[in-house]
């Protein structure tokens, strides 16, 4: 979970998803956060699948 949180935080920073955006436009913030979380989970899953495949 720590790695997932780290990836999400890095993506938020890179894409400018901030608390200011959340206050200004909650719907956009939620959509962008959902997108970021989904992509971060895909990264974690692909790493896990790769790790299992090499064993």
Image (cartoon, rainbow, N blue to C red):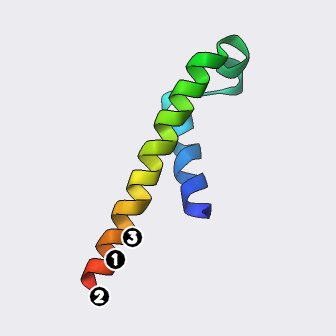
Residue 47 on image: x %, y %: 36, 66
Q: Which mark is residue 3?
A: none
Q: Classify mark 1: residues with Cα within 10 Å, few (<14), some (14-19) or many (20+).
A: few
Q: Which residue is mark 3?
A: 48
Q: Is residue 8 visible?
A: yes
Q: Residue at left 43%, top 60%?
A: 44
Q: Residue at x 59, y 44 (%)?
A: 9
Q: Does 12 sit above or below residue 22?
A: below
Residue where numbered disc 1 is placed:
51
Q: Where on the picture, by quarter, is residue 2?
A: bottom right
Contact, mark 1 vs mark 2 (Cβ under 8 Å)? yes
Between the residue at mark 3 and the residue at mark 2, the CA separation in whole angstroms equals 11 Å
Measure the alpha-carbon separation of dots 3 and 1.
Answer: 5 Å
On residue 55, the disc is 2
Ranked by sequence position, the earlier of labels 3 and 2 is 3
Q: Nearer the viewer, residue 14 or 22?
A: 22
Up the image or down, 49 lies above or below 42; here it is below
Measuring from the top left, give residue 6's x and y in whole percent: 58, 54
* Residue at 71% over, 26% down: 19
Q: Could you tell me which quadrant the N terminus lies in? A: bottom right
Identify the secondary structure beneath mark 3: helix
Front residue of 43 and 18 = 43
């Amino acid at each position: 979970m720590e790695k997932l949180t780290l990836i999400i935080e890095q993506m938020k920073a890179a894409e400018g998803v901030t608390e200011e955006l959340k206050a200004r436009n909650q719907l956009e913030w939620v959509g962008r956060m959902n997108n970021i979380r989904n992509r971060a989970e895909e990264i974690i899953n692909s790493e896990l699948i790769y790790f299992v495949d090499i064993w």
